[in-house]
Amino acid sequence: MVRSVQGSSSERSPQGEEITVNNQEKVIYQAKPHWFFLTRFITIVFIGLFIVFVGIIMTGSSGFDGQTTTGTGLAFCGTCSFCSGGIITAIGILMTLIGFLKYRNASYIVTNQRIIIKGGISTKYNDETMIHQIETIRVRSDSTGRLLGFGDLEFIGSGGSKTTLVMVTNPHQIQKHISNILSQKRQQYRY
């Protein structure tokens, strides 16, 4: 939970958590990472299942006991493939569950005064960067990200501090909003 400020109001994050902002602070963007975040973990599960399937085919009619005299080597390789595929699938399922919990608990909130990143599984964290401290905004998006509309937004602040919104939807739009806020704040400081 963000600390309360005198004369403040409350809003809700995507997870239903309360976000306290002061009267001059306005929430511009509020989201979670893109759903594609989970695909790398699910891919491991499918690779493991494919190896299990290959193991079943290699074992063939000899069964898993390896008792037949012909093709015993192939049956042994099939059994090894089956077992290793099962281990890879189990690891993939565990990684998918952990990834889902990270995805579910992650939250990005951009206000006209700060950037807030919330997340964590067993221990929660809350990372805040004041917008007036940002010097550079980088958008990184690979071909898949450009196709599906997501990318990473990296904010480099004074003193070299970095804050990154990972796999955020419409990163160029958020960059434009923050750049506009920064230019308005710089105009205010000039006068």
Image (cartoon, rainbow, N blue to C red):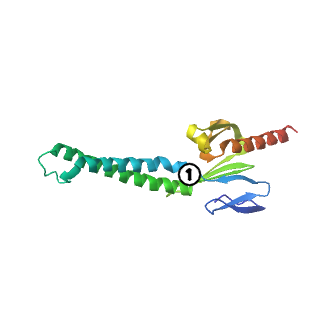
**Residue for point 40% across, 49% down:** 46
For label 1, the residue is 35
Can residue 124 be seen here? no
- 54, above or below 97, in the image: above
41 relative position to 130: left or right: left
Can residue 8 be seen here? yes
163 relative position to 50: left or right: right
Disc 1 residue type?
A: Trp
Please rate how many residues cluster around mark 1, counting C-alpha atoms within 10 Å: few if below 14, some from 14 to 19, many from 20. some
Rendering coords of residue 14 (x, y %): 63, 59
159 relative position to 70: left or right: right
- At numbered mark 1, what does the secondary structure look like: helix, strand or loop? helix
Instruction: State which quadrant residue 155 falls in.
Output: top right
**Residue for point 50% across, 50% down:** 38
In the rendered image, the quadrant that contains the N terminus is bottom right
Rendering coords of residue 188 (x, y %): 84, 42
Q: Nearer the viewer, residue 7 or 64?
A: 64
Rendering coords of residue 136 (x, y %): 68, 36
